[in-house]
DNA sequence: ACCTGCGCTGAGAGAAACCTGAGAGCTGCC
DNA sequence: GGCAGCTCTCAGGTTTCTCTCAGCGCAGGT
């Protein structure tokens, strides 16, 4: 169980860190918002403990940017009682829980365990491939920061291609998986829809992630090495 | 300070009740899950003390249904140490604290006070999405400062959509959740009511937060789409 | 260099999905 | 009983999507 603690009060941070290690957690600590955000983006933590008042970038903004980057690690906010932000704000931003300082260590551990237990599965699972992101819950697709509107069929096709990314899929595979099994038409439909998709996810961005493998099928790849 | 105690062991319940009254609390007691749930839904308590093992409906389910009904009164779970459920489960369901039987009365009171201090106001009592706010308690809806009058069906639909905001919900999902399970009509009703809602929550404000996702369903989003 | 066949694309017919106005049946209230 | 408000059905109209077709371009083979 890996935990990230972002807390600028050194003494408190050290106390919590030792306590958590005693409880069997692996703990990383950063002392300001910017390095906290960086750490949270780069590593797969199970929970992030995020102080609200932080140097360089406050917890409020860290959480916001984290979610914008589609990082859905559960976040437990640590708030000072007299803080200028209230907890409702934290919930709005996607914090999963909060604790008011001073807090009891027992309670902290219990909350962390609760978050870990219910953590990941509740989160929207987004498929990403390079800068392309597909969110099945909201049925939304984005390339970087721009939203892309797709029709039902285009969406189905992209969804399938993303699940099979970096593999060549044949037109008949596509027909089997995206079209109705009873579909009787020729496989030109696939070509047509591949064309539609390219005009939406590649051409506007000057990319070529959806390539033809002549005689074999198509392949979707990332636009930049991950 | 008003407290609801849901506990079936009559002797323990009576002891706790007297003790709390001595401490200046107003105490209601119920002895089973169903009446506990009813009382908790109907009255504005500051804290609910909820036993886990209860006749008719266990504490686990009571808490779950309470949260589903968007009642956010802080709940302190009373668990028997040998119970089949552990404390983490209680946290998962939205319990705010727990106490293992047998507990010291002093500790109980301290925990109750702690819950009351950080309690209710921190909880979202209204559902909000952008400038749209729905208050389940008063069954009222407003867009910004203007009140919006909705019929029962419209309210039910909006309530469901707000709980599933930013997700595409299909017409059949809507029928299952908003209409009577025995409803037999076609799903055109949904289209009609979506239309009614739009005329009340979107059109007058020049917004389009309730969008059609052709072939999939509908999605309610905040009024500031990214 | 020339064929041949695969893949791409614009245009458009047809169908599906959706929206909306009108109104019938109900219920509750005066 | 009569009215008002709500719920739901229906049918016609509108929008949008899906798929077909035909012609063109290009890759790969000879």
Image (spheres, coloured by chain):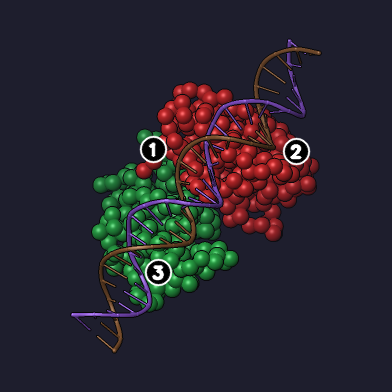
Chain colours: A green, B red, C purple, D brown
Relative to A171, does residue A101 appear above or below in the rendering? Answer: above
| SS of the residue under disc 3 | loop
Q: Residues within 10 Å of mark 1 (few under 14, many from 20)?
A: few
CA distance for labels 1 and 3: 33 Å
Q: Is residue A216 left or right of residue B102?
A: left
Q: Position of residue A211 (x, y in %)?
A: 33, 69
Q: Is residue A114 left or right of residue A224?
A: right
Q: Which residue is mark 3?
A: A165
Q: Residues within 10 Å of mark 2 (few under 14, many from 20)?
A: some
Relative to B105, does residue A124 appear above or below in the rendering? Answer: below
Quadrant location of residue B155? Answer: top right
Mark 2 and mark 1 residues within 8 Å of each other at the beta carbon = no
Residue at screen point 69% across, 59% down: B84
Q: Position of residue B26 (x, y in %)?
A: 67, 29
- Foreground pick, B163 / A40: B163
Q: Which residue is mark 1?
A: B224
Quadrant location of residue A118? Answer: bottom right
Question: Is residue B6 visible in the rendered structure shown here?
Answer: no
Q: Position of residue A111 (x, y in %)?
A: 51, 52
Residue at screen point 40% across, 50% down: A149
Q: Is residue A165 left or right of residue A208?
A: right
Relative to C25, does residue B67 appear above or below in the rendering? Answer: below
- The chain that hosts pointer 3 is A
- Foreground pick, B35 / D26: D26
Residue at screen point 57% across, 48% down: B170
Q: Which residue is mark 2?
A: B35
| SS of the residue under disc 1 | loop
- The chain that hosts pointer 1 is B
């Amino acid at each position: 169980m890996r935990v990230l603690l972002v807390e600028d009060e050194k003494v408190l941070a050290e106390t919590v860190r030792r306590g958590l290690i005693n409880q069997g957690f692996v703990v990383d600590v950063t002392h300001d918002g910017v390095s906290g955000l960086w750490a949270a983006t780069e590593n797969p933590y199970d929970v992030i403990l995020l102080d609200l008042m932080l140097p360089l970038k406050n917890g409020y903004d860290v959480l916001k940017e984290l979610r914008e980057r589609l990082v859905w690690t559960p976040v437990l906010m640590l708030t000072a009682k007299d803080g200028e932000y209230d907890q409702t704000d934290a919930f709005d931003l996607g914090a999963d829980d909060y604790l008011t300082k001073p807090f009891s260590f027992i309670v902290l551990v219990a909350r962390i365990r609760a978050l870990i237990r219910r953590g990941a599965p509740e989160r929207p699972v987004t498929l990403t491939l390079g800068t392309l992101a597909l969110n099945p819950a909201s049925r939304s697709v984005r390339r970087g920061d721009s939203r892309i509107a797709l029709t039902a069929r285009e969406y189905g096709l992209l969804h399938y291609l993303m699940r099979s990314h970096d593999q060549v899929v044949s037109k008949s595979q596509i027909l089997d998986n995206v079209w109705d099994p009873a579909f009787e038409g020729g496989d030109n439909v696939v070509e047509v829809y591949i064309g539609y998709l390219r005009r939406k996810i590649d051409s506007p961005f000057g990319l070529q992630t959806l390539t033809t493998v002549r005689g074999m099928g198509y392949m979707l790849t990332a636009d930049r090495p991950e």
